[in-house]
Image (cartoon, coloured by chain):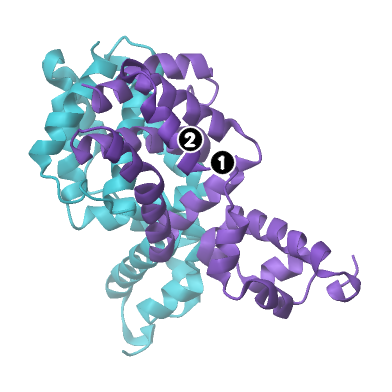
Chain colours: A cyan, B purple
Amino acid sequence: MTLGRRRGPTETRPLILKAAAQLFAEKGFDGASVRAIARNASVDPALVHHFFGTKEALFVAAMEFPFEPAQIVPRIVEGPREEIGERIVRTFLTVWGNDEARPRFLAIVRTATTSEQGAAMLREFITAALLNRVGDALEIPRLRITLAAAQMMGVVMMRYVLELEPVVSASDEELVEMLAPVIQGYLAP
Amino acid sequence: MTLGRRRGPTETRPLILKAAAQLFAEKGFDGASVRAIARNASVDPALVHHFFGTKEALFVAAMEFPFEPAQIVPRIVEGPREEIGERIVRTFLTVWGNDEARPRFLAIVRTATTSEQGAAMLREFITAALLNRVGDALEIPRLRITLAAAQMMGVVMMRYVLELEPVVSASDEELVEMLAPVIQGYLAP
């Protein structure tokens, strides 16, 4: 590939974002250096700083979610209360089943386990985007909401990080059948 | 500190293991270099290779568990079936509540999220040490056992990795009260 000089910003920016998403997914936030991202994007590291400023800002841009929690969560909590467990599990499996989204989510999980900053980032996102919204809608102890989230986070770990069978090859229907009553039990006991 | 030359092997080996446990906990398996471990232990990197061979062998030695799954798991599954959920949650909280064990477990989780090798290591350990033993004792679908493990893995993520409230400051009793019925439901429905 040629170096970045002859390319315009509309061409360079997405190249950097793509390389960043890939390297963050592989190495986590701390492990992926701006230098390595620039190298994979075939641009000068100075260009990365020029477009995004900090590595953190690059991370946020690269991880841009393919869905809007602000839109999805209210729809989930406002439906029939007796099916909230099933709605949550189905939405969760759909979002994680998206082949473009999954590497980004996994990058965020990796970052959260390997750096304080990454843990704070994910903690703040989960709190603001998910737990607060669910908490505002359902009048139940926050511990219940968080343990329901823990169940789904554990499924992520088993299915997508450890790739542990039979969770990997279980169908969405099998998982809904087992998980929906558990989430339902936490959120609408 | 002095360099390792004047120290004997009985002194040097534990220094290396201590530095390794610390750095693996901070950086994960890939992020912690033998060079950095040697530096933190104030020994020559060649000595680390001399004592442990590979970085993987050093990891296994440094992560040495403070408990024997081979002893604990049979005791859990052989007790009264109607309290298996509670026994599992209590044992789990006790093991993770151990201040010496926790950084080691966290290192393993970090390693699992950041390297294929680490994921395989944890997957193989969980399968051999926990899931197979529980599966041999209880005649229930493996998916149930793995989703119970996922619930507890999610608690680890929320409580010790993301440090998300109120899971962090919840008492063991509160957690047992909420989690035991869920684990019970998976394992002894």
Towards the viewer: B82 or B174: B82
**Label pair 2/1, CB-CB below 8 angstroms:** yes
Q: At 44% from the left edge and 30% from the top edge, which residue is drawn?
A: B75
Label 1, on which residue? Answer: B67
- Determine whether the residue tagged by mark 1 lies in a helix, strand or loop: loop
Towards the viewer: B28 or A6: B28
- Position in image of residue A180 (x %, y %): 17, 26
User: What's the amino acid at mark 1?
Assistant: Phe
User: What's the amino acid at mark 2?
Assistant: Ile
Which of the 4 image quadrants contains residue A187? top left
**Residue occupying the far left of the picture:** A173
The count of marks equals 2
**Residue occupying the far bottom of the picture:** A2
Q: At 66% from the left edge and 54% from the top edge, which residue is drawn?
A: B22
- Position in image of residue B23 (x %, y %): 64, 58
Q: Chain of mark 1?
A: B
Label 2, on which residue? Answer: B72
